Amino acid sequence: MTVRVLFLGEGPSDAGIAAHVERLAWSRGIEAVATSPDLDRLEKPPGHSVSAKLAAVAKMGGQYDVIVVHRDADGAGADARYLEVRDAVLSSPVAQLPHVAVVPIRMTEAWLLLDEQLIRTVAGNPRGHVNLNLPTIHEAERIRDPKNRLERILVDASELSGRRLQIFRRRFSEHRRQLLERLDPDGSVQRLASWSRFVEDMTKVFDEFGR
């Protein structure tokens, strides 16, 4: 049996999380295929509302077994986001399906600030030595604006200047996508509470299919 997963992120560069969903399924002896539709390309994009995204997907058709929704905690807090996702799913056409909310604190970028070598590699300067001032495990999920912090760290890691730096800055979304896809699940990120909950919740769902 192949478990069909619908993954809804906040943007196209969040699709890297879907790869980790498939990996978690494989680790439990389950084959899973995660579909991550780019809803921003629709004639009438649904925006950030989880309910609107689920309604848009329902109109597109398709059959799924599990719903996975990524929603950054931002200023609302993790608990509010988990409730938001739960309520949206339960009031949607897929209310009968199991779902998992993926809620990084504050933003997904907090997950990407801990692997120094991966950051240097994605920045195109794997042998760089400039001090990146990476946060500690305890600091990562407390940073007010981890997206801005990650952008600055990538710039520092690149050690570029002038025109080449300007071009590099414009590729932030691509760099972010690469960092997320290549994130080591057995690395420092596993010590972050939000990542641990994602893994735990996802594992429970796949274990149910395994039975």
Image (tube, rainbow, N blue to C red):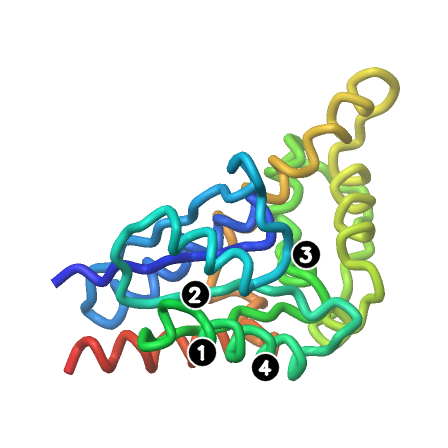
Marks 1/3 in contact by CB < 8 Å: the verdict is no
Query: Position of 57 compared to 45: left or right?
Result: left
Q: What's the mark number on residue 52?
A: none
Residue that appears at 42% across and 55% down: 18
Tell me how far mark 4 sits from mark 1, CA to CA.
10 Å
Q: Secondary structure at mark 3?
A: helix
Q: Earlier in the sequence, mark 4 or mark 1?
A: 4
Marks 1/2: CA distance? 13 Å
Q: Amino acid at mark 1?
A: Leu
Judged by depth in the image, the label closer to the viewer, 1 or 3, is 1
Q: Earlier in the sequence, mark 1 or mark 3?
A: 1
Q: Amino acid at mark 2?
A: Val
Residue 205, image x, y percentages: 32, 78
Q: Residue 74, position in %: x, y? A: 75, 67
Using the image as rendered, state which of residue 113 and residue 64 is in the foreground.
64
Comparing labels 3 and 2, the label whose residue is closer to the camera: 2
Closer to the camera: disc 4 or disc 3? 4
Compute the Cα span from label 1 to label 3: 28 Å
> Could you tell me which secondary element the residue under label 1 belongs to?
helix
- Marks 3/2 in contact by CB < 8 Å: the verdict is no
Cα gap from disc 3 to disc 2, whole angstroms: 19 Å
Residue 109 marker: 3
66 lies left or right of 153:
left
Residue in front for this viewpoint, 100 or 193? 100
Q: Which residue is mark 4?
A: 83
The disc, 4 or 3, on the residue closer to the chain's N-terminal end is 4
Q: What residue sits right under mark 1 in the picture?
A: 90
- Measuring 43% from the left and 65% from the top, which residue is drawn there? 68
Amino acid type at circle 4 is Leu
Mark found first going from the N terminus, 1 or 2: 2
Residue 115 at x, y percent in the picture:
62, 56
